[in-house]
Image: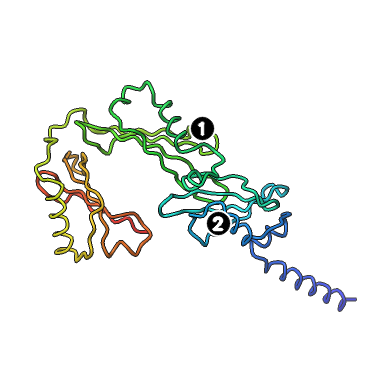
Amino acid sequence: MIYLLVTALLAGCVLLGAAMLLSPTEEKQASAEIDMNESAARSIVRAEIPAAEMPVEGNLMDDAPEDPVWEFQVRSKDQGSGVIGIDAKTGEVSYAYGEIADRAGVNTGISMEKAGEIAGNHLRGEEIEGTLTDPDVSYEPPHFAGDIGRYRVTYVRMIDGIPSFDGVRIFIDPEDGTVLKYHINWDLPATIETDPTPTLSAAEATVILTTAMEEKRGSKGMTILSTELYWYEGDSEQISLAWKIEFEDDYVRPYDAGPASAWLDAHTGEELLLCYYLD
């Protein structure tokens, strides 16, 4: 009897060990009623959003086992990012949100244009409205599986016709257009003593930056992407008129990141800030 009991227990342990070898995704597939695997769902994503960069990894969302969904975060260098859910039984698009879904025509929520309208209505009537630029609408991808991300609508504060770090950000639910968050940054005075007419031209500022980057930091292959005047307030609370110069060089190009940027005082040429946005 003891021998039989030990044998049964050992067999049970072997079976238990085999069950624990399943990956989390395999366990989800086993617990949910699905008719397609991740590869098949990925093929549907490619058909619906041809611009999506492949390969992409999916997560099986089976919180509701009767309606399992393969969810993919997708992106395109030219068309932005988004999230798309594929019904694991039928292969149909259950939901799609974000820039790339909007541009591919599969967005099941509100469009980016509509998000801008909602933000404008939320802002309308406030005294600051006339000092802001037109809205810039972008999509923030989700931070975890099962989330849908959000639209960010940004307004920049203008002083003497020059943009600043001040402004308003309004976050919109991409599914139903609910205003999720309203944030205002309003630190600069209404009048700034610094002369708003730059001493250095944009071309002169880029020459100063290029020379400094090459001679002092060994930067090579620099390409200037944009040059724009801004009000800049540093740690010293000194408000400067600055050229914001976005550029690429051989250092930043290998990374999947935005361009680098430098801020130069538009009167003296002093470097105020240098930023490399690297993943």
Which amino acid type corresponds to the residue marked 1 in the rendered image? Thr
Does 79 sit above or below residue 57?
Answer: above
**Horizontal relation, residue 45 to residue 279: left or right:** right
Q: Amino acid at mark 2?
A: Arg
Seen as rendered, the residue at the extreme bottom is 3
In the rendered view, tell whether residue 274 sits above or below residue 133.
below
Quarter occupied by residue 4: bottom right
Task: Left or right? Give the position of 106 relative to 27.
Answer: left
Residue 46, label in figure: 2
| 132 horizontally vs 177: left or right | left
Residue beneath the point at 65% across and 49% down: 92
Q: Position of residue 23 (x, y in %)?
A: 64, 65
Which one is in front in this view, the residue at disc 1 or the one at disc 2? 2
Sequence-first disc among 1 and 2: 2
Q: Report, in whole angstroms, how far the alpha carbon at label 1 lies from the one at label 2.
A: 30 Å
In this rendering, the count of numbered labels is 2
Q: Residue at label 1? A: 178
Q: Residue furthest right?
A: 1
In which quadrant of the rendered image does the N terminus lie? bottom right
Q: Are marks 1 and 2 in contact (CB under 8 Å)?
A: no
Q: Position of residue 253 (x, y in %)?
A: 32, 62
Question: Label for residue 200?
Answer: none
Q: Is residue 261 left or right of residue 207?
A: right
